[in-house]
Amino acid sequence: MNAESATSSQDFYFNPWDPEFRANPYPHYRALLTGPPRHVEQFFPIALVARYADCRAVLKDHQRFSSVQPPMPVGFDENNPFKGAATVLFADPPVHTRLRRLISRDFTPRRIREMEPRIKEIVEGLLARVEKEGSFDAIADLATPLPVMVIAEMLGVPTEKYATFKSWSDAIVAGDNTLPGMPMPPELIEARDALVSYFSEEIERRKREPGSDLVSALVAAHQESESLSAGELLNFVVLLLLAGNETTTNLIGNGMYALGRHPKQLAMLRRDRSLLPRAIEEMLRYDGPVQSTVRHPNEIVNVGGAEISPDTITFVILAAANRDPAQWEEPEKFDITREPKDHLAFGEGIHFCIGAPLARLEAAIAFGAVLDKFPTLRLKDPDVRPQYKGSFFLRGLESLPMSTD
């Protein structure tokens, strides 16, 4: 059964493989917010959890809703770069607890504050390159290189390789758009193998020449206490690169687009920088970098009036929950003065994004610097509909031309 026929008899439309759906899924979420979780058959049974209260309940119930991916049919898991070992993203306690503890020291509030001067330096350098041009691409010139350079430095690898890292990351993320059971695109295979090969060599080098970076710390944990298997160590480093850049890139890009589409909000933020923290929370709520996450029930669970069985993959649609009228007044409105509430852009429960403080800091520095340097900032062409990358789960723009003159 193809995805289109699977949804044709429903009173809603949900097809993450449809580029038109991915470009603007929000109108389709409204029907999902009017009742209990819906069920759909798309290659396998899927439950769509969309309401805020339901999403939050599932994310906090890690005992009944597992993050561990069950065995998939042959050909349905070929684009997974983490095959063979656990990662913090796809693990439950006690494995998740052990893995998360290993990197928590590098994401403490103190450690994040210590990174602020260097992040400012990177942002200033990036904007200096485009300052005299009269325009720049918010994605290519800022949102893409900044997070990659930051995470690359944390991992102790040369920041000049950021373009290579980003090309690998983009190719792997684009694999989300590969229909289940279909062969992986050659560029995805090449990117995954290159990324694994590169970090395999870096890990071996850190064993000989340890440093103060995060890779060295993880290598030491593997060598000293065997708290990381060899496969876990490699997957951990690969995940840090992917998760450490894609979500922040999308936060900055989607947020810049929201400001560009709402010039009154942009003007308000330009006049009153004290609104920046609220503005970033509103960007995360209004058009967050992650549309959905996945859970796997290990027993029959009633969620908001609908039963979800263990053979059903549960899509927890964070972006729908963040526009639930039961939680927010006028949820379709972009309002940087909105009183911040507990949006789900960074998840909830034990899997709440450990990098959230770093992402917020990078975004605050980036937006503050752009507003300082470009007082006439606006979309280069407000009528152009931007293109989104080929992933439903990670929502991000391909490019976003901005005018500054």
Image: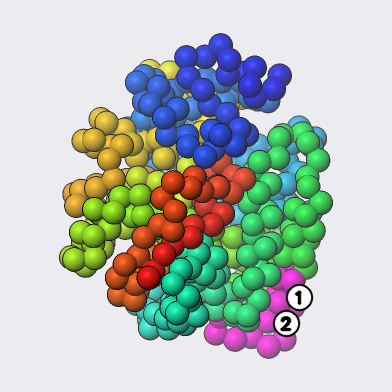
Q: Position of residue 283 (x, y in %)?
A: 34, 52
Q: Please tell me which residue is depicted at 63% across the width and 80% down the height of the picture.
A: 160
Q: Disc 2 to disc 1, how far (Cα)?
A: 6 Å
Q: Residue at image x 65%, y 37%? A: 70
Q: Residues within 10 Å of mark 1 (few under 14, many from 20)?
A: few
Q: Is residue 281 left or right of residue 385?
A: left
Q: Nearer the viewer, residue 259 or 5?
A: 259
Q: Quadrant of residue 8?
A: top right
Please give the label number shown on residue 205: 2
Q: Secondary structure at mark 2?
A: helix
Rendering coords of residue 221 (x, y %): 60, 73
Q: Where is residue 167 shown, x and y percent of the image? A: 67, 63
Residue 388, numbered circle: none
Q: Residue at x 41, y 29 (%)?
A: 27
Please tell me which residue lies in front, 273 or 237: 273
In the rendered structure, which segment of residues is drawn in magenta?
Answer: 198-215
Q: Quadrant of residue 398 in the image?
A: bottom right
User: Where residue 356 sits: x, y (%)?
Assistant: 40, 60
Residue that appears at 63% across and 40% down = 69
Q: Which residue in the protein does label 1 denote?
A: 201
| Disc 1 residue type (three-letter) | Glu
Callouts 2 and 1 close, C-beta under 8 Å: yes
Does dot 1 land on a helix, a strand or a loop? Answer: helix
The quadrant of the picture occupied by the C terminus is: bottom left
Q: Quadrant of residue 319?
A: top left
